[in-house]
Amino acid sequence: MGAMATSTSISESPDAPNSLSRLVRSDFWFLDGNIVIVAGDAAFKVHRGQLERHSEVFNDLFSVPQPEDAERLDGCLWVELYDRPSDVFYFLSALYDGLYFNTPRADDFAAIAGVLRLSTKYLVEVLRQRCLTRLSLDWPSTLAGWDQREHEATDSLGRYTPRESCPHPILLIELALDLDIPSVLPAAFYDLARYGPSKILAGAPLPPLAIDHFVTHHTDFTLNSYPYSGFSPGTHTNFETNTVTLSRANLHRTLLGREHIQLFMSTFISRELQSRPPSPSCLFQHDTPTPSQPCHESFYFIMLNVLRSVGGIACGRDADVLFTLVQAMEMLSRTDFSDGMKMCGLRMCAGCKREFAEVAVKAREQAWEALPVWFGLSELEVGEGVYVGL
């Protein structure tokens, strides 16, 4: 423990060392506070009891007897935390004001990450679990959860805007690797792999951090001069461009997983569309001179549209096998195709539709289960990313 500072000057506390004269008083500065937390160039005057009540670490820390002549700030003992000022700000906000997420927003991620880092470090399990629950909604471990997430990222006009509700996946990957949260990594790497290679390589913009902006505005403090950057070895932070990029190993992991996804989809197209036999119960199997011609033509039509999506015409989702398979199934019931004269649906019989829908559902399940292997997160064998069929 040691001394504290204010946003103007430490000279208000004559016993304070000169090295703390640059401290900035944060919004968490209670007149009746009895402990000052110092993080970087920010100071927080709060209540020992509030910290001790929620954290065994702080309880043990504050129980250490201090000498009578210990330096004080604003009349209080002080303790320095080697954490980012923004993390401390969000952590204290959660302790004092609660942690609530009414509507999912990508802008929430900075607060979630900060609270999760410090609630893990200082053993505040209630806040930690609340953060993990929120992350599991954005980055689910089940296919049903992923489908719900994608549904919520699509508005009533059909516009897909995932970055409004969920942060960039590289930010999540950085956090999950740093704190060892493996359950969210398959969904995060899959989300990232849906970008083109150039966008994957470009990285993600750093989220805005209100307390860091406040501190840098009042001092010459900079993130890259602070001893704790908060980013894991799995990523690289460029403070000049304010971006986070993947390490070479994780870039390779992402691009390799992307290749597995595309291989899986191309194998599915070859087996289940291009070379697909009609159902044994096909309504048109006895037609002459070409048995099951309407169903063959319908499968060919679906294949062309799937290839358009896989080829990148559906911008931003050319490696989204889960979405592509949903699109393929939706074509079975659509009635907005044109035969050159009127709007109509596919002429495929009910039996062929039913069987194709079954294999498409099964393929989505196989793809989801294979994600950990495709991205090098598991050693299980699942056919090297190749669709294995029913």
Image (tube, rainbow, N blue to C red):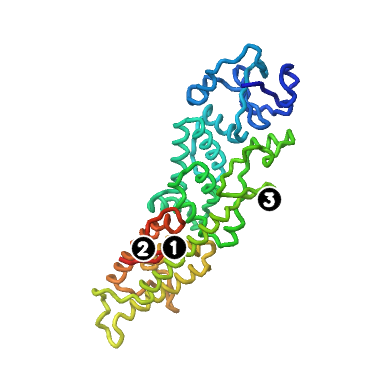
**Residue 340 x/y as whole percent:** 45, 79
Q: Which residue is mark 3?
A: 241
The image quarter in which residue 196 lies: bottom right
Q: Residue at x 62, y 18 (%)?
A: 77
Q: Which residue is mark 1?
A: 321
* Marked residue nearer the N-terminal end (3 or 2): 3
Q: Contact (CB < 8 A) between labels 3 and 2?
A: no
Q: Amino acid at mark 1?
A: Val
Q: Contact (CB < 8 A) between labels 2 and 1?
A: yes
Q: Residue at x 50, y 65 (%)?
A: 318
**Residue 349 x/y as whole percent:** 30, 73
In the rendered view, tell whether residue 270 sits above or below residue 321: below
Q: State the SS at label 2.
A: helix
Give the distance between the C-alpha atoms of the residues marked 2 and 1, in whole angstroms: 9 Å
* Marked residue nearer the N-terminal end (2 or 1): 1
The image quarter in which residue 109 lies: top right
Q: State the SS at label 3.
A: loop
Q: Amino acid at mark 2?
A: Ala
Q: State the SS at label 1.
A: helix
* Residue lying at the far bottom of the rendered structure: 289
In the rendered view, tell whether residue 252 sits above or below residue 353: above
Horizontally, is 179 left or right of 358 in the view? Answer: right
Looking at the figure, which quarter contains the N terminus?
A: top right
Q: Contact (CB < 8 A) between labels 3 and 1?
A: no
Give the distance between the C-alpha atoms of the residues marked 3 and 2, in whole angstroms: 41 Å
Q: Which residue is mark 2?
A: 363
Q: Amino acid at mark 3?
A: Thr
Give the distance between the C-alpha atoms of the residues marked 3 and 1, in whole angstroms: 32 Å
Q: Residue at x 54, y 20 (%)?
A: 62
The mark closer to the camera, 3 or 1, is 3
Horizontally, is 272 left or right of 249 in the view? Answer: left
* Marked residue nearer the N-terminal end (3 or 1): 3
